[in-house]
Image (cartoon, coloured by chain):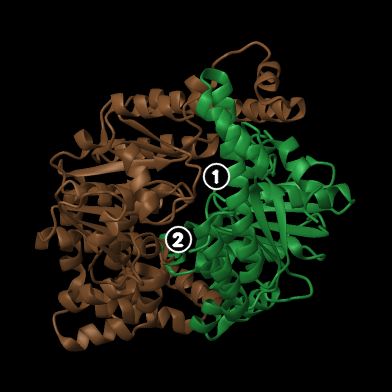
Amino acid sequence: MASLNEVLDGKSICICAGSGGVGKTTTSAAIATGMAAQGLKVCVLTIDPAKRLADSLGLEELGNEARRVDPALIEEQGVEMKGELWAMMLDAKATFDELIARQAPDEESRDRVLNNRIYQQISSALAGSQEYMAMEKLFELHTEGEFDLLVLDTPPTRNALDFLDAPKRLTQFIEGKSLRVFMKPTGLAAKVTGRGVSVALGVFKRLVGFDLLADLAEFFNAFSGMVEGFQARAKRVNKLLADPETCFLVVCGPQGEPIDEAVYFHRKLVEAKLPFGGVIVNKVHYPADELRAEVEDLPGALAEKLGDEALAKRVAANFADYQALAERDARNIDHLAGELRTSCVIRVPYLDEDVHDLHGLADIDRYLFATAEERVEMAAGRA
Amino acid sequence: MIVTGKGGVGKTTVAVALGLRAASEGKRTIVCEVASQENASRIFDHASVGFHEVEMEENLWSISIDPDESMREYVLLQLKVRAMRDLLFRSRIFNYLAAATPGLKELVTIGKIWELAQLDRKVKSGRKYDLVILDAPATGHGVGFLQTPRTFASIARVGPVHSQAEQLDRFITDHEHTGTAIVALPEEMPVNESVSLEKDLRDEVGVSVDRVYLNGLYPERFKKSEAERLSALAESENGAARAAARAALSEYGRAKSQRQQLSRLKKGVSAPVKTLPFLFEPELDVEAARSLAGKLG
């Protein structure tokens, strides 16, 4: 079993991916904290509008600028901080606006795009644009070279595909080559496209209202000068994602549904030829082995020790419930490891205390960064 | 009834439990999913249902609403002239526009939910439902999803879509007929998010928030005095007795910290809070959902 340190060795980008509710934000923050403690200058980025990351790092708020987490706060948790930990929350709209400003040939085209209602919708609402902007910002930070490692907490898209296809879909939309031709009200286009298209456009106009089409036309016209710049940039972003210095980690939970999604996500990463590093399973009822310890008549043995039969019965029944959960988790994780054919499956136990602050992150790091042997040791001391 | 909340809190289970309860009371009920994951049919151990109203139990149906299919159905209902429809569907430009128009997919999805809720169904020989339950997308996207009709009505200022978008917005914000339930977990951050979600739903979307379900609450199996005895036992023993004592202490600790989250939630939201127990079941199936159905209050 490979450890997280081995997986992240020599990497400059770590992307945590997975469905919602599996602890991605916490995991990203914990990885960043752990790597910073070891001496790297690390920045963790989130695009989740919820204040989770800021909360867990003891920051008042996060903005579109990186902020340094006070090392004293981390050292208070008994963790020696050899490097630097930074955090930021991506503002997708602000990043998109910056990008437009950079790509626009002049101020007038910039303002035309920024003020266009379709643009305003896309930049904040179009599915995939948030993800795309996360990649943009990642690319920008990577190019600037300020940090040794960037950890990205991806948004909780229900469909993993959205996230991987985001750059492609967005550039396709912006390119809109065929569409732009049709948008011109007169001229050559109208002649060559023929009646079918104009009828289709007419029907669409009737359905959605004329001025939406006008806005779309305006948008594509305003964007026309920037298409190439966008395409070139998207290509470089894609190249960065596929770079051997980038590492994708799949984060999931131990129940059947999140495990299935992790398998699906892994397949998508492999298909897209993106560098998969390993999988992190959170909130595992851990470890199954010790809980499986078989004793004949456990209630009896407990009753003898406790001198309370009723309590012993409840303790034994509760133990059986925990055992069942631990067995399910072990089964699901075995299935996951088999499907992914990976040597890196890191199990983080379901800690008794809810993880939402630096103390909790330090607790998680003990598991995340342990070697395989250490994990077994800790497991034996736990249960 | 719109069931909403962040990812992984058990929205689908609660949506199905609500459906089971309504169905058992004799209400003809349909549970709608909006992503292609089909978690509801999975709970029923049923094959994928797709864009069809499939009966799961007596009085209970399920559908997975696909935006492309909804769009198709919408166009079919709007355009009575067959030649025109064929032209539109064959047209690449139409598909392109439909995909490119921001929010259109969400709009037709909500449109389908509206259609299901009509007593005078637009779809030929459509079944009449007493209750339509929406398993809404995870928040972050959830509030935006429910706001689509209003956003759209303001983009398209004229035309049929404009008036239909306004109609859908009235449908969602109709406090008399449409309600919302938030599903939360008894942990620090999910509680924080549920509190801000309720505020957004009320103030920004304008829906009625009728109930907050705190899902996965551990039972209080042990008293404080018992926990103290068990912790002494865990120190002195080895093997299974120690493991069992530890498991009991873990249960005790979680049950306790969850009660604190429960009281924070109650203070933070204005809708009534109802707790649902954590189910010590390896996988959630229809019987698990049924056992929750009795506790929905």
Q: Secondary structure at mark 1?
A: loop
Q: Is B108 placed left or right of A290 in the picture?
A: right
Question: Where residue A209 sits: x, y (%)?
Answer: 52, 81
Image height check: is A97 above or below A267? below
Name above or below for residue A237 compared with residue B154: above
Whether residue A9 sits left or right of residue A369 in the image: it is left
Chain B rendered in what hue? green
Mark 1 and mark 2 in contact? Answer it, CB < 8 Å: no
Q: Are tags 1 and 2 found on a single chain?
A: yes
- Viewer-nearest residue: B10 or B160: B10
Instruction: Write down which chain is painted brown.
Output: A
Q: What label does residue B37 carry, if any?
A: 1
- Identified by mark 2, the residue type is Asn
Q: Which residue is mark 2?
A: B95
Question: What is the spatial separation of the Cα atoms under label 1 and label 2, in whole angstroms?
Answer: 23 Å
Label 2: state its secondary structure.
helix
Q: Residues within 10 Å of mark 1 (few under 14, many from 20)?
A: some
